[in-house]
């Protein structure tokens, strides 16, 4: 099944133009799994599933997702996404499920990058 997920992600990301808004990024990158709940991905708008994730906090959820978590590949399989682009898309998805998150400012991005660096160093 993971091979199918990777193939689908590669096909979708290779065929889509660069997305500029969080919703466009969701449609181009994330929707392949988060629309259907593929590989355990929380479905867009599923308040129960996203509620648990929202409780983890915006910094933690965004940073951990950026590196890949559970069945999700790093950056949702789109290696060229920046932390800010990825985090903005997480905001979009969380808010569709009842979250009240804002796009991260410079201070929040700094915290995300610090968590990413710490987790990356721990993997080495």
Image (spheres, rainbow, N blue to C red):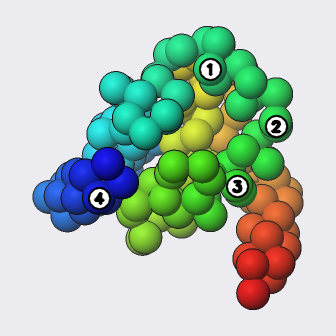
N-term-proximal mark, 4 vs 1: 4
**Residue occupied by mark 2:** 57
Which residue has dot 1 on it?
49
Q: Is residue 81 visible to the viewer in this orientation of the structure?
A: yes
Disc 4 target residue: 3
Residue 45 vertical position relative to residue 30 in the rendered view, above or below: above
Residue located 51% across and 49% down the image: 71
Q: Nearer the viewer, mark 4 or mark 3?
A: 4
Residue 94's x, y, as percent? 61, 27
Is 32 located above or below residue 2 in the figure? above
Per the image, the residue denoted by label 3 is: 64
Q: Closer to the N terminus: mark 4 or mark 3? A: 4
Assign a secondary structure to mark 3: helix
Judge from the rendering whether residue 86 lies leftward or rightward of residue 27; answer left or right: right
In x, y percent, where is residue 43?
Answer: 46, 24
Identify the secondary structure beneath mark 1.
Answer: helix
- As measured in the structure, the alpha-carbon distance from the residue carrying label 4 to the one carrying label 1 is 24 Å
- Looking at the image, tell me whether mark 3 or mark 2 is earlier in sequence order: 2
How dense is the environment of label 1, judged by Cα within 10 Å: few (below 14), some, or many (20 and up)? some
Q: Is residue 98 left or right of residue 115?
A: left
Q: Label 2 crowding class (10 Å Cα cut-off): few <14, some 14-19, many 20+? A: few
- Mark 3, residues whose alpha carbon is within 10 Å: few (<14), some, or many (≥20)? some
Is disc 2 placed on a helix, strand or loop?
A: loop
Decide which of 112, 75 is in the foreground and name it.
Answer: 75
Q: Quadrant of the C terminus?
A: bottom right
Q: Give the residue drawn at x 79%, y 48%.
A: 60
Upstream in sequence: badge 2 or badge 4: 4
Label 4 SS: helix
Q: Earlier in the sequence, mark 1 or mark 2?
A: 1
């Amino acid at each position: 099944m993971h091979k199918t997920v990777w193939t689908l992600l590669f096909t979708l990301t290779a065929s889509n133009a660069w997305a500029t808004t969080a919703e466009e990024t969701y449609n181009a990158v994330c929707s392949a799994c988060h629309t259907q709940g593929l590989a355990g991905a929380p479905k867009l708008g599923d308040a129960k599933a996203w509620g648990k994730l929202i409780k983890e906090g915006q910094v933690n959820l965004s940073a951990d997702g950026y590196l890949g978590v559970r069945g999700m590949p790093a950056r949702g399989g789109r290696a060229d996404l920046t932390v800010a682009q990825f985090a903005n898309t997480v905001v979009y998805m969380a808010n569709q499920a009842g979250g009240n998150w804002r796009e991260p400012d410079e201070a929040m991005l700094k915290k995300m990058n610090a968590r990413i660096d710490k987790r990356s160093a721990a993997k080495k």
